[in-house]
Amino acid sequence: VEESARLRAQTLRIRREAAGRYSVDRLTGSGPSMQRIRAQIEVAGVSKARLSIVGPVGSGRSRIARAVHYFRPQ
């Protein structure tokens, strides 16, 4: 029982750290396009739907995917 509780606490800590690392606030840029992307991340983050992120190499698709995955409504 103690081991199970310890592992749960450790998992929660790791998830919180990742959520902070990949939060929407950590995305750079403040132009209209980035504002639109942030709004779309918030919509996708609370949805149960699957999504596909498209864009050229180096456009930050994996960063966006992590931001959606770890999104927590405020």
Image: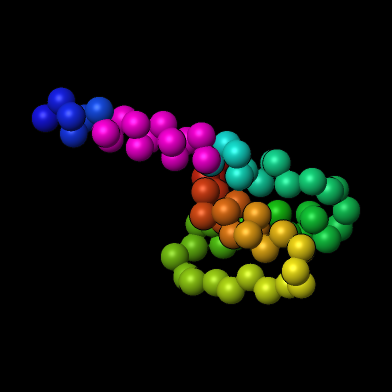
**Is residue 33 covered in magenta?**
no
Residue at image x 51%, y 34%?
17
Q: Where is residue 16 in the image (x, y as percent from the top left)?
A: 47, 35
Task: Write the start and end of the magenta stretch as one range.
Answer: 7-18
**Secondary structure that dominates the magenta span:** helix
* Residue that sits furthest to the front in the current view: 57
Q: In this view, does 14 lie to the left or right of 37?
A: left
**Is residue 12 covered in magenta?**
yes
Residue at image x 11%, y 30%?
1
Residue at image x 44%, y 40%?
15
Q: Position of residue 57 (x, y in %)?
A: 75, 69
Q: Which of 72 and 13 is in front in this view?
A: 13
Does residue 42 appear in this view?
Answer: no
**In the rendered image, the vertical position of residue 21 relative to residue 1, given as above or below:** below
Q: Where is residue 70 in the image (x, y as percent from the top left)?
A: 52, 48
Q: Is residue 43 left or right of residue 4?
A: right
